[in-house]
Image (cartoon, grey):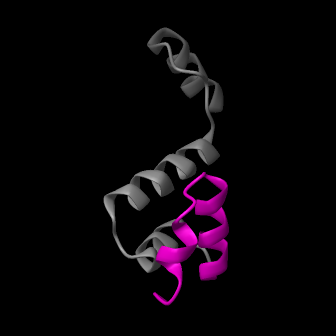
């Protein structure tokens, strides 16, 4: 099954990616769309807000910690 999405990437000119890449894309798009960080946490199914903050920070969303602070 995993090979199928890799095969689809090549003709589309997209670098192959896995499910974790989809999670990163989801987190980034949600962050830029502006919902509360608590919603991003629920969608990503993180147990703690610190995990969500670290995840967003690792994606280069440097102001993630300020946005998350005090929203939980």
Q: Quick check: 72 above or below 35?
A: below
Q: Main secondary structure of the magenta part?
A: helix
**Residue at (61% x, 25% y) in the render:** 16
Of the pair 67 and 4, the residue shown nearer to us: 67
Tell how many labels: 0
**Residue at (47% x, 52% y) in the render:** 28
Of the pair 20 and 49, the residue shown nearer to us: 49
Q: Quick check: 40 above or below 68?
A: above
The reply, left or right, for residue 39 in relation to residue 18 is: left
Of the pair 63 and 16, the residue shown nearer to us: 63
**Residue at (40% x, 52% y) in the render:** 29
Residue 38 in the image, given as x and y percentages of width and height: 45, 80
Residue 49 in the image, given as x and y percentages of width and height: 59, 81
Q: Magenta stretch containing residue 18, yes or no?
A: no
Q: Is residue 47 visible?
A: no
**Residue at (66% x, 78% y) in the render:** 50
- Residue interval drawn in magenta: 48-72
Q: Is residue 31 visible?
A: yes
Q: Quick check: 29 above or below 3?
A: below
Identify the image quadrant of the N terminus.
top right
Residue 59 in the image, given as x and y percentages of width and height: 61, 52
Residue 21 in the image, given as x and y percentages of width and height: 59, 42
The reply, left or right, for residue 69 in relation to residue 48 is: left
Of the pair 64 and 39, the residue shown nearer to us: 64
Q: Magenta stretch containing residue 68, yes or no?
A: yes
């Amino acid at each position: 099954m995993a090979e199928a999405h890799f095969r689809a990437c090549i003709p589309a000119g997209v670098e192959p990616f896995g499910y974790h890449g989809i999670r990163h894309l989801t987190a980034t798009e949600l962050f830029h769309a502006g919902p509360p960080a608590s919603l991003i946490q629920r969608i990503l199914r993180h147990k703690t807000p610190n995990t969500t903050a670290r995840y967003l920070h690792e994606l280069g969303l440097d102001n993630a910690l300020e946005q998350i602070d005090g929203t939980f």
